[in-house]
């Protein structure tokens, strides 16, 4: 992680997690102030985490048709199998695109 502050010590994973959770908690608190119709959304926001952000970024890259190998490298995965969890294409779309782009024509 990046060194922050005067100590120049790297930010630990746990510290980053705490910072992100604190930001989400603060945003959820402000959302609740808007009224009862925002309570459910605020509760969802409080459950968000650094991992949720990471997964969202990976999903966004994959949904944007970024080569899955690049998504793997960006996320630091050792295997494409792990990275493939970030794909959210429905079965019909997957079958249609496979048929269009990988046709054997037997």
Image: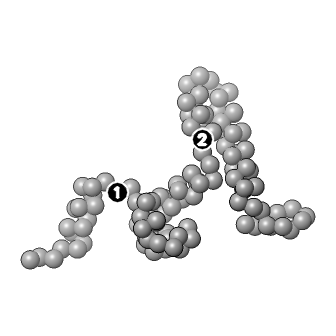
Q: Are marks 1 and 2 in contact (CB under 8 Å)?
A: no
Q: Nearer the viewer, residue 48 or 30?
A: 48
Residue 13 percent across, percent down from the top left: 71, 60
Q: Quick one: SS at disc 2? A: helix
Residue 8 percent across, percent down from the top left: 86, 68
Q: Quick one: SS at disc 1? A: loop
Q: Which residue is mark 2?
A: 47
Instruction: State the residue lying farthest toward the left.
Output: 106
Which residue sits at x=53%, y=56%? 55
Q: Which residue is mark 1?
A: 89
**Exactly how many numbered labels are in the figure?**
2
Q: Which mark is residue 76?
A: none
Residue 50 percent across, percent down from the top left: 63, 53
Residue 90 percent across, percent down from the top left: 31, 54
| Of the two numbered discs 1 and 2 in the rendering, the one whose residue sits closer to the viewer | 2
Q: Nearer the viewer, residue 14 or 92?
A: 14
32 to the left or right of 79: right
Is residue 102 among the parts visible in the rendering?
yes
Question: Where, quadrant-wise, is the C terminus in this rendering?
Answer: bottom left
User: How are the residues colored?
Assistant: one colour
Give neighbour class at mark 2: few <14, some 14-19, many 20+ (Cα, 10 Å).
few
Q: Nearer the viewer, residue 32 or 73?
A: 73
1 to the left or right of 55: right
Which residue sits at x=64%, y=33%? 31
Instruction: State the residue lying farthest toward the right.
Output: 6
Question: Where, quadrant-wise, is the N terminus in this rendering?
Answer: bottom right
Give residue 36's quadrant in the image. Answer: top right
Mark 1 or 2 closer to N-term?
A: 2
Which residue sits at x=27%, y=55%? 91
């Amino acid at each position: 992680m990046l060194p922050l502050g005067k100590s120049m010590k790297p930010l630990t994973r746990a510290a980053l997690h705490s910072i992100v959770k604190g930001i989400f908690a603060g945003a959820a608190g402000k959302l609740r102030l808007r009224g009862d119709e925002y309570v459910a959304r605020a509760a969802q926001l409080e459950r968000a985490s650094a991992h949720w952000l990471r997964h969202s970024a990976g999903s966004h890259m994959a949904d944007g048709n970024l080569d899955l190998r690049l998504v793997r490298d960006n996320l630091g995965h050792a295997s494409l199998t792990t990275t493939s969890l970030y794909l959210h294409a429905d079965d019909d779309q997957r079958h249609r695109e496979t048929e269009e782009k990988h046709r054997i024509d037997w």
